[in-house]
Image: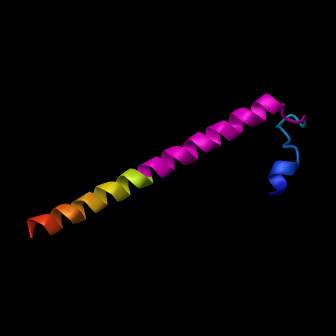
Amino acid sequence: MSEETVPQQGGSGQPKGLLQQMEELMAALNADLSALDADLQAAGEAERGVVEEGQAG
């Protein structure tokens, strides 16, 4: 949690602007959501495979 309250320092030693922080947070959120979507789709495909096997038997 300390990362959220402490201003991040850029490579030049100057604090990042609010817009840059928001862009980085949005990029991280987008990556997390993409990974979650892939996990959910894989789980759904696996579940469909189990249901199809149960119906065939």
- Could you say where residue 28 lies in the image, as x and y percent from the top left? 63, 43
Expressed as whole percent of the image width and height from the top left, the position of residue 33 reads 54, 45
> Which residue is found at the position 29% from the left and 61% from the top?
47
* Residue 38, placed above or below residue 23: below
Question: What segment is highlighted magenta in the picture?
Answer: 14-38
Q: Closest to the observer: 16 or 1?
A: 1
- Across and down, in percent, residue 37 comes to 45, 48
Q: Residue furthest front?
A: 55
Q: Is residue 30 magenta?
A: yes
Report the residue at 42% width, 49% height from top.
38
| Residue 49 lies in the magenta-colored region | no
State which quarter of the image contains the C terminus: bottom left
> Secondary structure of the magenta portion, mostly?
helix
Q: Can you say whether 35 is above or below 18 in the image?
A: below
User: Residue at position x 86%, y 41% from top?
Assistant: 9
What colouring does the structure picture have?
rainbow
Q: Using residue 16 as the reference point, say whether residue 43 is left or right of it.
A: left
Residue 22 falls in which quadrant of the image? top right
Identify the image quadrant of the N terminus: bottom right
